[in-house]
Amino acid sequence: MRNRRKLPKPQLTKSIGAAGLGAYCHLLGPRLDMPRLFAAMDIVTSSSLSEAFPLAVGEAMACGVPCVVTDVGDSALMVGETGKVVAARDPNGLAEAWRELIEAGPEARSHLA
């Protein structure tokens, strides 16, 4: 099978540029090396508004990365006590959960995961 790299949606690229986040957001497209990428992360977030069973959350957890997720679908059940769960559509809750995990430090995050 030929590897076809999907280009990011123009609307997303435009929104990132308009927000001045171009230097901070990297749209990588399809990847075959996700375990390597997850292992380099400190926190993984799923801010979905609706999700049945978020595979990315399970993959991150399998790589030992704590997650911050919105309480949709099975996300809260998956994360349990190993991360943080916030209400959907609550950007302040996401920011607070990130702050808590960042301030807890690498050792505490590693213990959670």
Image (cartoon, rainbow, N blue to C red):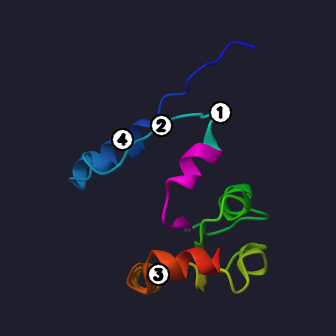
Q: Does residue 89 appear in the picture of this structure?
A: no
Q: Give the range drawn in magenta.
A: 35-46
- Give the label, 2 or 3, closer to the camera: 3
73 up-or-down from 51: above or below: below
100 up-or-down from 102: above or below: below
The Cα–Cα distance between marks 3 and 1, rounded to whole angstroms, is: 28 Å
Residue placed at 43% from the left, 80% from the top?
105
Would residue 62 be found to the left or right of residue 109 on screen? right
Q: Are marks 2 and 3 in contact (CB under 8 Å)?
A: no
- Amino acid at pointer 3: Leu
Q: Is mark 3 on a helix, strand or loop?
A: helix
- What residue is pinned by disc 1? 32
- Residue 45 on the magenta span: yes
The Cα–Cα distance between marks 2 and 1, rounded to whole angstroms, is: 11 Å
Q: Tell me, for residue 101, which label it has, or none.
A: 3
The Cα–Cα distance between marks 1 and 4, rounded to whole angstroms, is: 22 Å
Mark 4 or mark 1, which is nearer the start of the sequence? 4
Q: Tell me, for residue 13, which label it has, or none.
A: 4
Q: Tell me, for residue 28, which label it has, or none.
A: 2
- Residue 112 occupies which quadrant of the picture? bottom right
Q: Residues within 10 Å of mark 3 (few under 14, many from 20)?
A: many
